Amino acid sequence: MGKSEEKHPLIDVWNSYRALHKNGNATLKNPSIEQIIGEMFAIGNYYYYVLNLADSTLTGHHKNILKLHGFKKFPEHLKQIIDLIHPDDISFVLNAERIVIEKIIEVGKEFQLYLKPSYCFRMKTTKGNYELFHHQAIHTLEDDEGNLIQSVNIHTNIQHITKENPYTILLTGISPRVDFIQVKIDPTVPTYLASENDLTKRETEILSLIARGYSGKEISLMLILSEHTVRTHRRNILHKTQCRNSKELVKKAFDLGLI
């Protein structure tokens, strides 16, 4: 598998919103490099890298990434960064990214280059243990349709400040924007893929029927759909929820409160 084809869990989050286009016309110019640097919060050892959102490749690394994580050479793909995150924090990170995207859409995608998300998670260090890092993403480039294609990600080791993750997502404005959106979430909530918002109304309806034990043929008769269409919906539901079979779909339906 080539570097540009490496799979990591955030791809599914981003792809869920890939079809959304910019609403309205941008009223702000791209922030300058000076502004980007000025918006960095780094009380402690930090590093940054440039993330190409099209293929998740990394460039422009700060040298501290080698010292803090023990890399022998600069990582080339975001998966190498995600693999450092504590397994118990992955679900929170996925939820945080989903919330960030939803809040940006609420504010207006035309302002996304002036909105900086941040939150915390544990990462493996050179010492082999996990320490708390503060993550910031400063959006730097979008395509003609208003989709983000580049960001500068900054990670700061804050273990010396606190060992407790507040499980809070912040979305703050970069001058002249003055946005301050704070969302605190329960880290025990299932991953973003278990969110009802990720399923269409029809998929939610079919999932609830599958969980109740109805067959594909029975569902097709109840909803006046072809069996082929029901099978297609079931396949999409399995993909979105990362379930392997109907047994796991039943659990997912309970998590979503559908039964």
Image (spheres, rainbow, N blue to C red):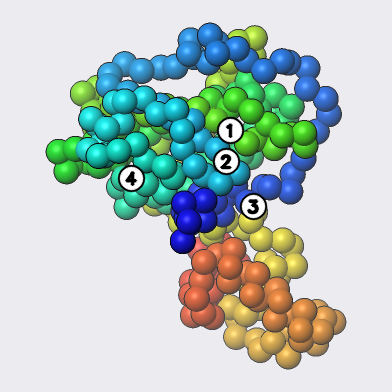
From the viewer's perspective, is 200 left or right of 237?
Answer: right
Compared to 93, does 225 lie above or below? below
From the viewer's perspective, is 254 left or right of 148?
Answer: left
| Label 2 with label 1: CB-CB less than 8 Å | yes
Mark 1 vs mark 4: in front: 1
**Numbered tag placed on residue 16 in the rendering:** 3
Residue 95: percent from left, percent from top:
50, 46
The residue that appears at 65% across and 86% down in the rendered structure is: 214
The Cα–Cα distance between marks 2 and 1, rounded to whole angstroms, is 5 Å
Compared to 230, does 61 lie above or below? above
The residue tagged 1 is 150
Residue type at mark 1: give it: Gln
The residue that appears at 64% across and 28% down in the rendered structure is: 141
Sequence order check, earlier mark of 3 and 2: 3
Sequence order check, earlier mark of 1 and 4: 4
The residue tagged 2 is 53
The Cα–Cα distance between marks 1 and 4, rounded to whole angstroms, is 21 Å
Front-most of residues 82 and 210: 82
